Image (cartoon, helix red, strand yellow):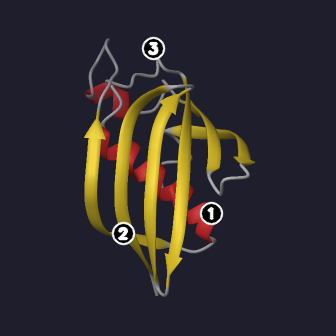
Amino acid sequence: MLIKDYYTINEVITREDGVILFQISLRPDCQVYQGHFPGEPVSPGVCNIQMVKECAEQVAGKPLFLANLQQCRLTTLVTPVQHPQVEVMIHLEEKGEAYKLKATIGKGEEVYLDLKAELTVIG
């Protein structure tokens, strides 16, 4: 789990349209940034995808496996310096033992990552 080092959840908001909004602080002291990249930290796409998955697990209330990544558009480099506060928007639809996920990482109207995936329950 990345939540201990990579980011902190500041607030979780449930909207009327079924979207769950996680207000998150990226942690610039995370070891990931020592290698990605020293002096100019860039949040790795794989870490951002994992952050989305961990937020989806909180919504589902169970551990999930990323079974099918249907779409992932990285539209802006995310850095803990330029983007210390981000919003992860999760829309999760249960389909039996699987979930359809639509998610974004961004701030306000700006979208940094747009993701569609299928998650399955672990265990």
Question: Which residue is located at x 52 percent, y 41 percent?
Answer: 5
The amino acid beneath tag 3 is Gln
Query: Which of labels 2 and 3 is toward the front?
Result: 2
Residue 59: percent from left, percent from top = 62, 63
Secondary structure beneath disc 2? strand
Name the residue carrying label 1. Answer: 59
Task: Give the labeled residue for mark 2.
Answer: 118
In the image, taking residue 67 as reference, residue 10 lies left or right, namely right
Q: Is residue 28 above or below residue 118?
A: above
Residue at point 26%, 52% (across, down): 71
Q: Amino acid at mark 1?
A: Val
Seen at 26% across and 60% down, the residue is: 70
Give the structural element (helix, strand or loop) at label 1.
helix
**Viewer-proximal residue, 112 or 64?**
112
Q: CA distance from mark 1 to mark 2?
A: 14 Å
Q: Is residue 59 above or below residue 67?
A: above
Whole-Å distance between the Cαs marked 3 and 1?
A: 28 Å
Disc 2 packing (10 Å; few <14; some 14–19; many ≥20): many
Q: Secondary structure at mark 3?
A: loop
The percent position of residue 44, horizontal first and vertical second, equals: 30, 36
Q: Quadrant of residue 7?
A: top right
Front-most of residues 122 and 29: 122
**Residue 82 badge:** 3
- Please state the horizontal and vertical placement of residue 17, each as a whole percent of the image: 66, 53
Tag in front: 3 or 1: 1
> In the rendering, at what x and y percent does residue 49 appear?
37, 49
Q: Which numbered disc, 1 or 2, marks the residue that appears first in the sequence?
A: 1
Few, some or many C-alpha atoms within 10 Å of disc 3 (few <14, some 14-19, many ≥20)? few
